[in-house]
Image (tube, helix red, strand yellow):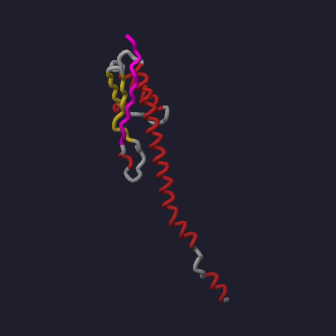
Amino acid sequence: MLKRFQRLWRRDRGSAIVEFALVVPIFFMVVYAIFAFGRGYSRLNALNSSIREGARKASTMPSALQHRDSITRVVQRFSSSYGYAVDTSLVVVAFGTGSDTVRVTNYAIFAGINFFGLQSITVTRAAIFRWEYGP
């Protein structure tokens, strides 16, 4: 009978569940952080590709300033193919001597993901292509 009570009241009984309860919240926070940063990096990659495509379109036009709406539509359409639509009010098209610039300012990378306040991180990206239109 004494051995039965000793087996029931061993000190290591239940230690696995306590260790599991201590480790699981940290593990899920790490997994969620990986998910959040992966999604943010994906949004940044889609933004860079969209701006590059808009600048390429701007470099083939006679005057980028006259075709600003079509360039912003190209940026929005290209970004929506990745699943992230860029707000057209953030797209700035500039025409300089020998180059066209398409820039997006104050773009929120962690939009929709609240992980320790990271939804407020914004970036500015620009792409410059040489103007290919010959007079």
Residue 33 location (% of width, % of height): 47, 52
Is the residue 22 above or below the residue 104 in the image? below
Q: Is residue 75 left or right of residue 17?
A: left
Q: Residue at x 65, y 89 (%)?
A: 2
Kindly give the residue lying farthest to the top in the view shown: 135
Residue 91 location (% of width, % of height): 35, 30
Is the residue 47 above or below the residue 33 in the image? above
Q: Quadrant of the C terminus?
A: top left
Q: Residue at x 60, y 81 (%)?
A: 10
Magenta stretch in the rendered image: 122-135
Between 51 and 20, the residue placed more toward the observer is 51
Residue 55 location (% of width, % of height): 41, 25
Q: Quadrant of the N terminus?
A: bottom right
Q: Is residue 85 left or right of residue 12?
A: left
Dominant secondary structure, magenta: strand
In reply to whether residue 130 is colored magenta, the answer given is: yes
Q: How many marks?
A: 0
In reply to whether residue 111 is colored magenta, the answer given is: no
Residue 48 location (% of width, % of height): 43, 34
